[in-house]
């Protein structure tokens, strides 16, 4: 009877561990997807200072997904973040902070 109880406790312990891992991974996925969406929106609005801060957070979250890069959706989110990083890397000022790219003068602009 004691063996049955300990076996049941062991099964519950494994289930709890797997559930905790799943919830943590889903939370990271939520942060990653939201972060990439925010990065893209901020880049369109040329909010490069905010992009620099958020990009570091997204890169940190991406580290948790290294083993999931075989999943197309995860790889796509990663590539989107890297595109934002590459698109803003030429605008980095001293210390790695992003600086706005000058807008070329055109008709009606001075």
Image: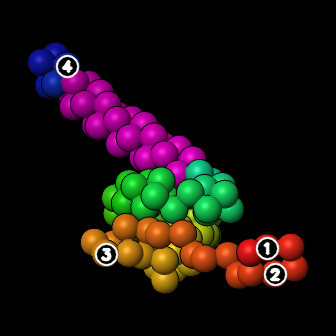
Residue most extreme to the left? 2
Labels 3 and 1: the sequence-earlier one: 3
Q: In which quarter of the view is residue 19 placed?
A: top left
Tell me the distance, in whole angstroms, between the alpha carbons under discs 2 and 1: 5 Å
Labels 3 and 2: the sequence-earlier one: 3
Q: Which residue is mark 3?
A: 94
Labels 1 and 4: the sequence-earlier one: 4
Q: In which quarter of the view is residue 92 placed?
A: bottom left
Bin the neighbour count of mark 3 within 10 Å (Cα to Cα): few under 14, some 14-19, many 20 and up: few
Q: Which residue is mark 2?
A: 106
Q: Are marks 2 and 1 in contact (CB under 8 Å)?
A: yes
Bin the neighbour count of mark 2 within 10 Å (Cα to Cα): few under 14, some 14-19, many 20 and up: few
3 or 4: mark nearer the eye: 3
- Element assignment for label 4: helix
Labels 3 and 4: the sequence-earlier one: 4
Q: Split into 4 quadrants, where in the image is the C terminus?
A: bottom right
Q: Which mark is residue 5?
A: 4
Q: Which residue is mark 1?
A: 109
Tell me the distance, in whole angstroms, between the alpha carbons under discs 1 and 4: 78 Å
């Amino acid at each position: 009877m004691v063996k049955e109880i300990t076996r049941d406790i062991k099964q519950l312990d494994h289930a709890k561990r797997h559930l905790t891992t799943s919830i943590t991974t889903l939370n990271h996925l939520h942060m990653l997807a939201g972060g990439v969406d925010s990065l893209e929106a901020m880049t369109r609005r040329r909010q490069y200072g905010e992009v620099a801060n958020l990009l570091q957070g997204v890169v940190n979250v991406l580290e948790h997904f290294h083993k999931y890069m075989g999943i197309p959706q995860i790889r796509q989110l990663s590539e989107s973040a890297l595109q934002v990083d590459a698109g803003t890397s030429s605008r980095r000022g001293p210390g790695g902070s992003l600086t706005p790219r000058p807008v070329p003068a055109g008709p009606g602009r001075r």
